[in-house]
Amino acid sequence: MAITAAQVKELRELTGAGMMDCKKALTATEGDVKKAIDWLRENGLAKAAKKEGRIAAEGLAKILIDGNRAVVVEINSETDFVAKNEKFLALLDETAKTLIGSDAATVEEALALPCAEGTLNDAFINAVATIGEKITLRRFAVVTKNDDEIFGSYTHQGGRIVAVTVLKGTDDAQVAKNMAMQVASMNPEYVSRNDMPQEVIAHERSVQEGIVANDPNLSSKPDKVKAGIIEGRLSKLLQDMCLVDQEFFLDTDQKCGQYLKSNNAEVVSFVKYTVGEGIEKKEENFAAEVAAMAK
């Protein structure tokens, strides 16, 4: 099948690999981006797995906590300048206040909620008309806790990265905040291995098997040695994905699980938003790279 420049660009942004390597990977996987990422990893060509996704869009995220409910919301704009606009900030506040007491489960349901300007959708339309730039409600999450649990929250760079945690076993607000900061800075995907789907583990093991199989330096090693290398790499990878197994950012001599245990605390859940993750922004200078690739 024909591989488009847009597909190459997307894969390049996701992996940091060269354009020609991205084209080879897409060709080998018939244009399947997810399989192409694995192909690059297995062949040692992906410079980094950019877990935050494609180049970020602009905007801000916000956390609002009220009793046993918290809401995390992200609103996108076209430029960083608009994200600092008072009208934009007011819209972010109004959206969070509207959502925290609602039962909305989707963006469409959220936009239909009543607010001071009619509906939340009306508020967005009015903001766009006033500011003159596209502004969208991208996503939100309503987080709840029990009376014997505690929220922790952290906002970085004024709302570029936000994280909220739910802890039980402690009423120490600093411990809860430290875990929110851990989530924001170290980007875990799960609380522990118990929360990780078996298909995720199987997929990552398959990727590591491919990497080892394609490493010429390991070709002469016995199968038992190769299996040990695969399991060792897999274990390290899965640790990085799980909050309790990560090194605690304030004391790297201990794991987060150890820090939590010493404070009689346990993380129940967490939510992290990085503004614009997974959204591709328009680039003006890509044409020259496409032309070079076509030669």
Image (cartoon, grey):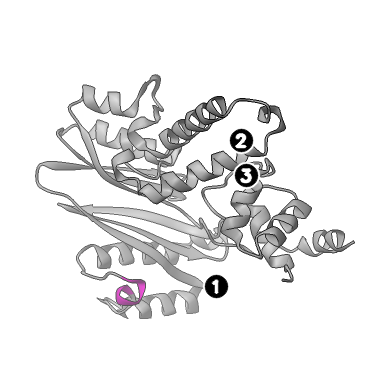
Q: Position of residue 185 (x, y in %)?
A: 44, 38
Foreground label between 1 and 2: 2
For the point 72% across and 71% down, the residue is 1
Name, please, the residue furthest toward the left. 147
Q: Residue at x 18, y 41 (%)?
A: 150
Identify the residue position indicated by label 3 in the image.
41
Few, some or many C-alpha atoms within 10 Å of disc 2 (few <14, some 14-19, many ≥20)?
A: some
Q: Nearer the viewer, mark 3 or mark 2?
A: 2
Residue at the disc numbered 2: 212
Amino acid type, residue under disc 3 in the picture: Arg
- First in sequence, mark 3 or 2: give its number: 3
Would residue 189 be found to the left or right of residue 22 on screen?
Answer: left
x, y percent for residue 120: 33, 75
Pick the quarter of the image with the C terminus: bottom right
Q: Residue at x 42, y 79 (%)?
A: 126
Circle 2 SS class: helix
N-terminal-most mark, 1 or 2: 1
The reply to whether callout 3 and callout 2 are in contact (CB within 8 Å) is no
Query: In front: 14, or 79?
Result: 14
Q: Quadrant of residue 214?
A: top right
Above or below, 37 against 224 in this view is below
The amino acid sitting under disc 1 is: Glu
Residue 133: which disc?
1
Q: Are marks 1 and 2 in contact (CB under 8 Å)?
A: no
Q: What segment is highlighted magenta in the picture?
A: 106-110
